[in-house]
Image: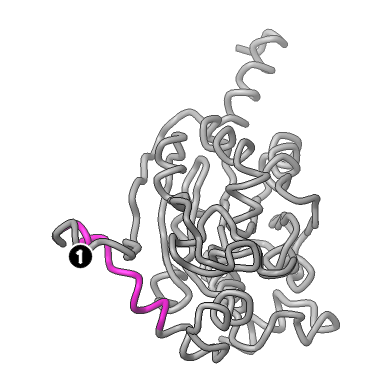
Amino acid sequence: MVTEIARQYLRHDKFPSIWCPGCGHGIILGAILRAVHKLGLDKNKVMMVSGIGCSGRTPGYVDFHTLHTTHGRALTFATGIKLVRPEMTVLVVMGDGDAAAIGGNHFIHAARRNIDITAIVYNNSIYGMTGGQVSPTTPTGMYATTAPYGMIEKPFDIVELALGAGASFVARGSSYHVPMLDGLIKKAILHKGFSVVDVITTCPINFGRRNKLSADGAKNLKYVESIVVPLSKYQKMPEEERKGKFPIGIFRQEEGLPELTEKYASLENKLRGEE
């Protein structure tokens, strides 16, 4: 299956990747490809859009229709694509800074509109490509180039942000729990409406090494394992034990809600007198 997926969905001339050894981004890419494969999607009807950053390199490696856009604007480009070609499966890959900092306003309004796009956030708590600055999800107390004495601000919770903005499918996975991540992305793609999958991963260099977690990829995966908890278990934990933990699972899955491209099609038909 691995060989078949590699042959079908990857641009072999673009490898080796630029991702650092031990980076979780390759794990997330694998999960996306397996989800697409298991769903039997025609790759010529799949569009992948990204912004800027380490996650933004993903479209360069996949043999879909792809678009590498400006920082924080991936969802705006994807919205235009989906409105013009609603039959396309549109996947948006973003880093935590790309999605929740400069792209935060686009994120909340894409959720509000419930447009049928799947947003996958590579949440590594840092600006990995541009020098290791703090991002909106850098945990309090962690170190970065712009927080040499430790982050003093409270981080964004992307799941809570998506829930508050009205996304109709909201999930969180991790780069450690790979089979679960495959399933979450598959369900997100199948969902009719705006889907968010927040993926907890680590940057082994600008986050892992700086915070004395090690630059070793395997050790960083163990760190991911230590900070994520299944949602069912998390809900039973006392408040003091929840500190520093990220629940993983599906937080919302509301089917049958009005979807933006369908509402536009209905309006167009009405204006043409076809309804």
Instruction: Name the residue beneath numbered marker 1.
Output: 241
> Which quarter of the rendered picture does the C terminus lie within?
top right
Q: Residue at x 73, y 77 (%)?
A: 10
Residue 144 position in % (x across, y down): 59, 68
> Residue 238, located in which quarter of the rendered image?
bottom left
Q: Residue at x 63, y 16 (%)?
A: 267
Is residue 34 toward the left or the right of residue 221 in the image? Answer: right
> Which quarter of the rendered picture does the N terminus lie within?
bottom right
Q: Among all residues in the image, which is located at the extreme front?
A: 149
Residue 143 position in % (x across, y down): 54, 69
In this view, the residue in front, 198 or 130, is 130
In this view, the residue in front, 144 or 45, is 144
Q: Which residues are magenta?
A: 223-236
Q: Residue at x 37, y 79 (%)?
A: 225
- What kind of residue is marked 1? Glu
> Residue 92, located in which quarter of the rendered image?
bottom right
Residue 273 position in % (x across, y down): 68, 8
Main SS of residues in magenta: helix
Q: Is residue 31 above or below residue 114?
A: below
Q: Is residue 270 above or below residue 49?
A: above
> Is the residue marked by circle 1 packed among few (<14), some (14-19), or many (20+) residues within 10 Å?
few
What SS does tag 1 mark? Answer: helix
Examine the structure image and report whether residue 231 is included in the region drawn in magenta. Answer: yes
Q: According to the image, what is the colour scheme of the structure?
A: one colour
Examine the structure image and report whether residue 53 is included in the region drawn in magenta. Answer: no
Is residue 185 toward the left or the right of residue 241 in the image? Answer: right
